[in-house]
């Protein structure tokens, strides 16, 4: 029993039931008067200044010692706005008639919060878009583009365009050399949906590449409605379509390419036939190795041996420069110019992982070619073959014949890339223009071969970009085959020949020259494409933000 304030006894049970605050150890004792505040709740912050305690504000010259004191220079009136300003955030507007590649590249460089609202191109199905199926369709389209040799930036732009056409604007595609992934988050509070796909096999077919570009263009067209089922059906047709050229046509094209390249370095009709036979034999041996499941490294090694063997046979027969021309022509048919241009382009656009993988692939192919040629040249030198490394300095100049040979080389290169027949004529003319510019600068003007190659490759990239925008297609079919006459086949061959004759210093210098020419080709093609985007209104879909310089940090 206890006694209440009124003097009457009260049981413990009654005290607990009717006066619960007395049970708290922080309860105010009876008889102690504490001033009550107004209607405002009491301050509960542990950093609040107690009542009755006066604090001294530090003078302006005194260092601020408290972490909770406002800085002396702080002013609420001059503080930056914490939320959206009254004038609003500047809206991003894109040119409607620009190609979808440029519009998607522009938005990919923007943060998600700054991207414009999605354009209602494809009608959403009942209940909203089927997100897993849209992501699967996006990955399948990206797989075909990446396997066909398209650059990583263009693959990401195409994947982003497909998702955006079905209303999935908060998506982030990611492209590497062998892996594609995409993530979509409906809102900030929803869980993201992520899907990925591995690219295990790459095959060059620019006809299929152009068909995929047309599909993406239809998906992004506001006047065309393509449902998910229709898109899947068209994609299945693209995958099932056979190559436009049969195997025998590809073998014949490789022979004509090698023969044309031999004419560019001084060969005659006999050399043309010999280089064509060597390249066709090497192509058939490579097909045989591929059928047996051998990796591409050994395919390139085997394909490089027949042209080198025919060149050694010409040297043993004392034909003179013809042997070098035959080997050079055979190397032209094998040099991986397509992979080199794609690798350098990925590096210049900031996709360094994909660029490193592509360039590593080029290096393996090049080492395979070097291995095959060096084996044949080594045994050729041992048996008495007199191959002249200085033969490249006495190449006869035949402008008309060389221009025709360069155009034939580009045409056959386009056939090897499985291009559409409608693009073959354009790329043939582009290759002739490239060789004409190179000859005018290097032969007539006396300019260095590296600078001449870079300018000619830049024109190839510029014209290719113009043609691709005119036809709303990929630029690869208009540029890759056109750089064929500029490939450093002769510099590569003479570097290998010097190394086979134990002249390692001269060989390394020649191989370094070949590497410089290859880099000039790749950078020139990319620079020509970028110039077209900077100067043409049809390609200027807003400002494409570039990566900021890190200055070494």
Image: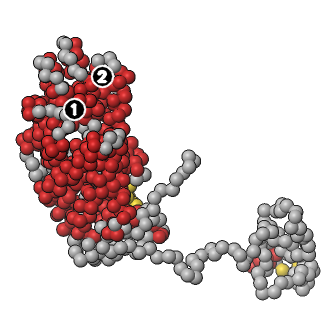
For residue 290, side relative to residue 522 (left or right):
left
Residue count near mark 1 (Cα–Cα under 10 Å), binned few <14, some 14–19, many ≥20: some
Q: Which residue: 29% across, 53% down? A: 459
Front one among 31 and 544: 544
Q: Secondary structure at mark 2?
A: helix
Q: Which residue is mark 2?
A: 498
For residue 204, side relative to residue 342 (left or right):
left
Q: Position of residue 4 (x, y in %)?
A: 87, 81
Residue 57, located in which quarter of the rendered image? bottom right
Q: Nearer the viewer, mark 1 or mark 2?
A: 1
- Between the C-alphas of marks 1 and 2, the distance is 18 Å
Residue 2, located in which quarter of the rendered image? bottom right
Compared with 357, 1 (above or below) is below
Disc sitting over residue 395 in the figure: 1
Residue 386, located in which quarter of the rendered image? top left
Q: Work out which residue is located at the far top of the displayed protein and give it.
A: 383
Q: Which residue: 53% across, 79% down? A: 88
For the residues labelled 1 and 2, say whether their Cβ atoms are less than 8 Å apart: no
Is residue 192 visible in the rendered image? The answer is no
């Amino acid at each position: 029993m206890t006694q209440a304030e009124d003097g009457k006894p009260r049981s413990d049970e009654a005290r607990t039931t009717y006066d619960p605050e007395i049970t708290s150890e922080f309860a105010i004792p009876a008889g102690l008067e504490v001033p009550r505040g107004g209607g405002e709740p009491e301050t509960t912050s542990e950093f609040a200044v107690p009542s009755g305690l006066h604090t001294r504000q530090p003078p302006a010259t005194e260092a601020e010692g408290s972490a909770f004191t406002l800085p002396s220079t702080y002013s609420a009136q001059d503080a930056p706005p914490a939320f959206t300003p009254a004038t609003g955030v500047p809206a991003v507007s894109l040119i409607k008639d620009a190609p979808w590649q440029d519009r998607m590249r522009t938005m990919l460089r923007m943060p998600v919060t700054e991207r414009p609202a999605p354009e209602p191109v494809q009608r959403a199905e009942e209940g909203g878009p089927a997100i897993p199926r849209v992501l699967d369709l996006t990955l399948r389209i990206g797989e075909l583009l990446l396997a066909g040799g398209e650059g990583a930036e263009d693959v990401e732009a195409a994947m982003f365009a497909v998702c955006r056409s079905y209303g999935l604007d908060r998506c982030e595609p990611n492209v590497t050399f062998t892996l594609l992934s995409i993530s979509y988050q409906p809102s900030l509070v929803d869980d993201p949906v992520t899907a990925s796909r591995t690219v295990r096999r790459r095959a060059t077919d620019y006809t299929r590449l152009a068909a995929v570009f047309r599909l993406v263009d239809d998906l992004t067209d506001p006047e065309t409605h393509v449902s998910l089922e229709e898109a899947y059906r068209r994609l299945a047709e693209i995958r099932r379509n056979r190559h436009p050229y049969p195997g025998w046509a590809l073998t014949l094209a490789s022979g004509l390419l090698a023969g044309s390249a031999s004419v560019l370095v001084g060969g005659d009709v006999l050399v043309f036939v010999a280089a064509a036979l060597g390249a066709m034999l090497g192509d058939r041996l490579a097909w045989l190795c591929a059928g047996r499941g051998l990796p591409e490294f050994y395919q390139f090694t085997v394909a490089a041996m027949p042209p080198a063997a025919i060149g050694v046979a010409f040297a043993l027969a004392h034909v003179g420069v013809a042997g070098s021309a035959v080997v050079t022509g055979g190397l032209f048919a094998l040099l991986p110019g397509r992979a080199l241009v794609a690798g350098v382009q990925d590096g210049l656009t900031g996709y360094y992982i994909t660029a490193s993988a592509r360039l590593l692939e080029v290096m393996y192919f090049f080492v395979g070619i070097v291995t095959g040629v060096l084996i044949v040249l080594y045994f050729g030198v041992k048996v008495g073959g007199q191959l002249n490394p200085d033969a490249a300095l006495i190449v006869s100049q035949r402008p008309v014949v060389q221009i025709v040979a360069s155009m034939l080389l580009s045409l056959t290169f386009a056939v090897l890339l499985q291009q559409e027949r409608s693009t073959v004529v354009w790329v043939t003319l582009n290759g002739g223009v490239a060789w004409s510019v190179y000859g005018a600068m290097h032969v007539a003007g006396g300019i260095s071969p590296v600078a001449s190659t870079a300018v000619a490759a830049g024109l190839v990239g510029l014209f290719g970009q113009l043609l691709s925008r005119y036809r709303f297609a990929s630029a690869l079919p208009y540029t890759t085959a056109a750089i064929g006459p500029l490939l450093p086949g002769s510099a590569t061959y003479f570097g290998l020949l010097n190394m086979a004759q134990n002249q390692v210093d001269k060989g390394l210098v020649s191989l370094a020259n070949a590497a410089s020419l290859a880099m000039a080709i790749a950078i020139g093609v990319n620079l020509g494409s970028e110039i077209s985007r900077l100067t043409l209104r049809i390609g200027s879909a807003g400002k494409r933000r570039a990566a900021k310089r890190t200055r070494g940090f």
